[in-house]
């Protein structure tokens, strides 16, 4: 399950699929689970499990209620040999020069590529607390300009820009990054505005997926990904037993989820909520129960190795190349997930 492959795609090597590779990311534990020293050890453990499983990187969240993602990224980098931090980056939090300097500093100190998850959304209350009333679609326009400044600085340019959101004159970094350490970009592609922005800046567009049967094929040559959790075992019964034990009913979480719907203008949040209101299909591995109980933000695929691999393979056949997993509860769980990806790749034509 561990090997290296073409530039930019070094995750779970599942075999070549139409001359492309599938890239898999895990997700870092959130500081809401508890702080140091237990949180530090939890981050280190998950990072090392993810690296051992062959993940390309690990998503690190950001919002008003979490510890700084850049300090967590440094912890991840120090604790692993090649795992790439996928740092969530919100324009409202940090000037693009500062962000570019953080990427360059980590790159030069550790010789490690950083991935950037460019955020335009967020909880409305968080944005209002920052006095940021910018509308949903306009935030994506701002993020495009933000990404332009960052990428030009990291490429070694002296940047002069008089834009709608940022104005800089002869701005440059002390030392540009070499080509092999230039960051790769991700951005939400769930809304039309997000997808257009991702295409504009050359970012990998990631979405919270519908059922494979309800998704459309991705455009040829376009990098796309999905955010999805997986619980798989040898049998359907065992997988569902594990899934229900991990995500029991939580009335407080359900109320929190309803409140979150009221304070979010997120396209994907509304989309998942609407799908959760639909009746589940018989023997359907697509499961929104954790989302409905505010235990996580992504749909899950639950079932036997073969059944989940079939659904995963359908996403791959549609052109989704990157998969961001939920926070792994254990190293063993990543072994089960790896078995699913191996089967999914085997279902695809060579």
Image: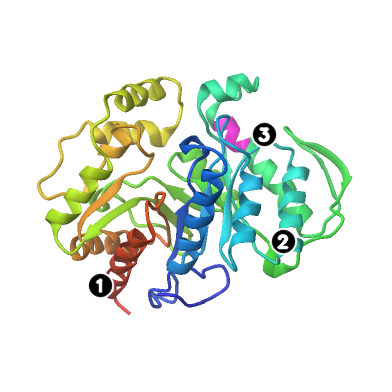
- In the image, residue 138 lies in the stretch drawn in magenta: yes
| Whole-percent x, y for residue 260 in the image | 41, 24
N-terminal of the pair, mark 3 or mark 2, is 3
Q: CA distance from mark 2 to mark 1?
A: 37 Å
Quadrant in which the N terminus is drawn = bottom left
| Whole-percent x, y for residue 239 in the image | 19, 54
Q: Is residue 155 visible?
A: yes
Question: What residue is disc 3 on?
Answer: 93
Closer-to-camera residue (250/100) = 250
N-terminal of the pair, mark 2 or mark 1, is 2
Question: What residue is disc 1 on?
Answer: 347
Count neighbours of disc 3 (C-alpha within 10 A) and say few if under 14, some if 14 to 19, many if 20 or more. few
Image point (83%, 56%), residue name: 157
Tell me: residue 164, above or below residue 286: above
| Whole-percent x, y for residue 55 in the image | 47, 64
Question: What residue is disc 2 on?
Answer: 107
Tell me: 265 left or right of 80.
Answer: left
Quarter assignment of residue 233: bottom left
| Badge nearest the viewer, 3 or 1 | 3
Q: Is residue 285 visible?
A: no
- In the image, residue 76 lies in the stretch drawn in magenta: no
Tell me: 10 left or right of 170.
Answer: left
Asked which secondary structure carries label 3, the reply is loop
Closer-to-camera residue (48/289) = 48
């Amino acid at each position: 399950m561990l090997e290296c492959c073409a530039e930019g795609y070094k995750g779970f090597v599942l075999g070549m699929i139409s001359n492309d590779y599938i890239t898999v990311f895990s997700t870092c534990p959130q500081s809401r689970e508890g702080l140091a020293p237990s949180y530090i050890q939890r981050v280190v453990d998950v990072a090392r499990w993810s690296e051992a499983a062959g993940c390309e990187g690990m998503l690190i969240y950001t919002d008003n209620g979490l510890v700084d993602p850049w300090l967590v990224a440094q912890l991840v980098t120090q604790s692993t040999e090649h795992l790439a931090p996928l740092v969530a980056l919100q324009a409202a939090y940090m000037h693009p020069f500062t962000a570019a300097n953080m990427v360059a500093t980590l790159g030069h100190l550790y010789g490690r590529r950083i991935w950037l998850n460019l955020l335009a959304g967020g909880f409305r209350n968080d944005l209002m607390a920052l006095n940021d009333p910018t509308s949903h679609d306009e935030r994506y326009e701002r993020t495009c300009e933000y990404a332009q400044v960052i990428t030009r600085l990291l490429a070694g340019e002296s940047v002069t820009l008089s834009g709608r959101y940022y104005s800089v004159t002869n701005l440059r970094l002390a030392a540009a990054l070499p080509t092999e350490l230039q960051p790769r970009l991700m951005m939400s592609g769930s809304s039309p505005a997000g997808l257009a922005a991702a295409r504009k800046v050359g970012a990998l567009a990631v979405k919270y997926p519908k059922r494979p049967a309800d998704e459309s094929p991705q455009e040829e040559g376009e990098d796309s990904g999905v955010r999805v959790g997986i619980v798989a075992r040898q049998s359907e019964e065992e997988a569902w037993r594990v899934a229900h034990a991990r995500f029991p009913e939580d009335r407080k979480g359900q109320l929190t989820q309803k409140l979150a719907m009221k304070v979010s203008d997120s396209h994907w949040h509304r989309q998942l909520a609407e799908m959760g209101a639909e009746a589940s299909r018989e023997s359907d591995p697509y499961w929104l129960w954790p989302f409905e109980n505010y235990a996580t933000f992504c749909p899950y695929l639950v079932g036997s190795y073969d059944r989940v691999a079939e659904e995963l393979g359908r996403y791959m056949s549609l052109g989704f190349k990157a998969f961001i997993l939920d926070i792994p509860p254990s190293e063993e769980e990543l072994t089960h997930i790896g078995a699913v990806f191996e089967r999914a790749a085997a279902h695809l034509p060579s």
